Image: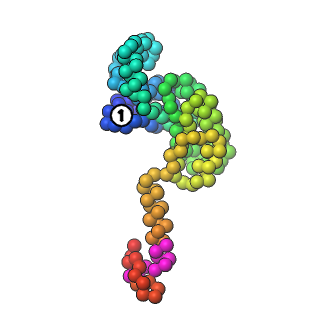
C-alpha cells in the first residue's frame, strides 16, 4: 500500500480512507498516520507513530483540529487479519473495521458461501472484537438483503449496501421488465398502446 495515496485523496477533499486487505500492524499505523496526522509526513511522522516523539503544542491541537473529521477504515478480508485483529485494534485512531465478505470467504476456503457457519463465526468474531474496542464494524455487500440483516443482528453498525451501478441496473431491469410484461417488445403492445421498442 502507498500511504501517500491516502494523503493525496484527503488533500483532494475526501474525509476518509478505506484501505484494503489490512493484515499487519505497521500498515495500520501508516494508514492512521496518513489520515489522522496530516499534513505531517516523512521521518518525523515515523517517529511520532513509533512513540519516539510526542507532538507539543500548538502543533498537537492543530493536527487534531485539521483531521477531526477524517475517518480511518481498515478492511478485514483474510484469516491472517482475523488472527492479527487484537493487535490491529490496539493501533490508535482506527475508526472502523470494514469486512470484505468476498475476499474473506476465499481466505476461509468457502468461496461465496456466506451462509456457512465458518463464515458466520468469522463475522461474529470480527464484529464482537471491533465493537468491544469501541470502533464501528461493517461490510460492503451487494448480493442479498438476508445476509445484510443477519450481520446487523450480529452487531454490525456500518453498512455499505450495493453500489450505484447495481442499484441503477436493478431498477432498470425491474422497470423495463414491467414495461415488457405490459406492452410486449413491439412498438404497439396489446390493444394498440405505445410500448418500448426493443429495449
- In the picture as drawn, the residue positioned furthest to the right comes out as 117
Residue in the picture at 55% in, 32% down: 135
The spot of residue 20 in percent (x, y) is 46, 37
User: How packed is label 1: few (under 14 Cα within 10 Å), some, or many (20 or more)?
Assistant: some
Q: Is residue 72 above or below residue 63?
A: below
162 part of magenta stretch: no
The residue closer to the viewer here, 96 or 103, is: 96
- Report the coloring of the rendering: rainbow
Residue 7 appears in which quarter of the rendering? top left
Q: Secondary structure at mark 1?
A: helix
Residue 5: tell me if it is visible. Answer: no
Q: Judge from the rendering whether residue 123 lies leftward or rightward of residue 103; answer left or right.
A: right
User: For mark 1, what is the residue?
Assistant: 10
Q: Is 132 positioned to the left or the right of 47 in the image?
A: right
Query: In the displayed image of the protein, which residue is found farthest to the bottom?
Result: 191
Q: Which residues are magenta?
A: 178-187
At x 54%, y 27%, the residue is 88
Vertical side of 191 occupied by 33: above or below: above
Q: Position of residue 100 (x, y in %)?
A: 52, 42
The answer to which image quadrant residue 153 occupies is top right
Task: Give how far across and how far down residue 62 sits, in percent.
Answer: 37, 21
Residue 183 lies within the magenta run: yes
Where is residue 83 drawn, in percent x and y?
Answer: 59, 30
| Magenta segment, prevailing SS (helix, strand or loop) | helix
Residue at position x 45%, y 37% from top?
A: 18
Looking at the image, which residue is at 40% across and 19% down? 61
The answer to whether residue 48 shows anywhere in this view is yes
Quadrant of the image for the N terminus?
top left
Amino acid at each position: 500500500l502507498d500511504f501517500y495515496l491516502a494523503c493525496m485523496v484527503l488533500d483532494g477533499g475526501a474525509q476518509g480512507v478505506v484501505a484494503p486487505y489490512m493484515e499487519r500492524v505497521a500498515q495500520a499505523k501508516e494508514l492512521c498516520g496518513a489520515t489522522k496526522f496530516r499534513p505531517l509526513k516523512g521521518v518525523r511522522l515515523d517517529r511520532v507513530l513509533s512513540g519516539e516523539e510526542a507532538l507539543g503544542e500548538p502543533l498537537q491541537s492543530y493536527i487534531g483540529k485539521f483531521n477531526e473529521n477524517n475517518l480511518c477504515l481498515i478492511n478485514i478480508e483474510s484469516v491472517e487479519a482475523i488472527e492479527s485483529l487484537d493487535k490491529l485494534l490496539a493501533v490508535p485512531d482506527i475508526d472502523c473495521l470494514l469486512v470484505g465478505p468476498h475476499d474473506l470467504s476465499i481466505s476461509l476456503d468457502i468461496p461465496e458461501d456466506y451462509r456457512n457457519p465458518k463464515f458466520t463465526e468469522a463475522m461474529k468474531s470480527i464484529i464482537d472484537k471491533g465493537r468491544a474496542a469501541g470502533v464501528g464494524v461493517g461490510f460492503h455487500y451487494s448480493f442479498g438483503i438476508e445476509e445484510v440483516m443477519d450481520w446487523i443482528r450480529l452487531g454490525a453498525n456500518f453498512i455499505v449496501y450495493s453500489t450505484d451501478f447495481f442499484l441503477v441496473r436493478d431498477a432498470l431491469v425491474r422497470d423495463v421488465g414491467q414495461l415488457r410484461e405490459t406492452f410486449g417488445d413491439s412498438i404497439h403492445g396489446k390493444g394498440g398502446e405505445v410500448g418500448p421498442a426493443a429495449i
